[in-house]
């Protein structure tokens, strides 16, 4: 995608307009300054719970750079599925085949989510038993 060039006349006009100061603008700036001024930008673009500390250094819990690779892998997987369907003689519209593939992926995620919920629930019960002193030895 090529970047569109800005109209130099509009840029110059906008620059001049931004330089204009009025008594009203000055008063507004002073008022905002009393309450701390412009809010600072966040240092990190992600919420705090996505970070962990390793050896005293804060790091993301997941590899952001890997997301593009995972997306490319899923696209390749979908194309492979489409080719397999075509080889088997399935003549449905590509959109219908894609929807079926996506529904299978979502269903798989739901099964994994349910399995994780059960595991977390079991761990929470074991922790509660341990804290209450009612833990059963699992030898």
Image: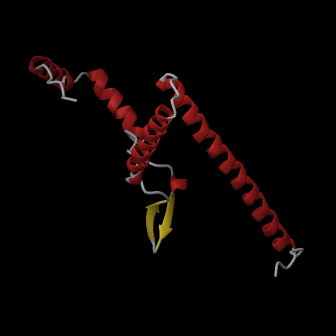
Q: Quick one: quadrant of the C terminus?
A: bottom right
Q: Quadrant of residue 35?
A: top left
Q: Nearer the viewer, residue 115 or 59?
A: 115
For the point 51% across and 63% down, the residue is: 52
Q: Nearer the viewer, residue 134 or 110?
A: 110
Q: Nearer the viewer, residue 88 or 103?
A: 88
Residue found at the far right of this picture: 134
Q: Nearer the viewer, residue 109 or 37?
A: 109
Q: Quick one: quadrant of the N terminus?
A: top left
Q: Quadrant of residue 56?
A: bottom left
Q: Quadrant of residue 116?
A: bottom right
**Residue 60 appears at what percent x and percent y?**
46, 58
**Residue 119 appears at what percent x and percent y?**
73, 59
For the point 86% across and 75% down, the residue is: 135
Residue found at the far bottom of this picture: 139
State left or right for residue 120 relative to residue 100.
right
State left or right for residue 11 relative to residue 64.
left
For the point 33% across and 32% down, the residue is: 29
State left or right for residue 129 relative to residue 112.
right
For the point 44% across and 62% down, the residue is: 59
């Amino acid at each position: 995608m090529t970047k569109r060039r800005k109209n130099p006349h509009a840029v110059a006009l906008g620059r001049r307009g931004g330089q204009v100061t009025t008594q009203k603008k000055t008063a507004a700036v002073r008022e905002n300054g009393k309450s701390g001024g412009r809010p600072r930008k966040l240092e990190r673009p992600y919420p705090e719970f996505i970070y962990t500390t390793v050896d005293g250094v804060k790091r993301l819990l997941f590899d952001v750079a890997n997301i593009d690779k995972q997306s490319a892998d899923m696209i390749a997987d979908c194309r492979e599925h489409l080719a397999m369907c075509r080889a088997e003689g399935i003549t449905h519209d590509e959109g219908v085949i894609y929807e079926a593939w996506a529904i299978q992926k979502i269903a798989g995620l739901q099964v994994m989510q349910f399995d994780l919920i059960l595991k977390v629930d079991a761990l929470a019960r074991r922790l509660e038993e341990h804290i209450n002193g009612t833990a059963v030895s699992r030898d």
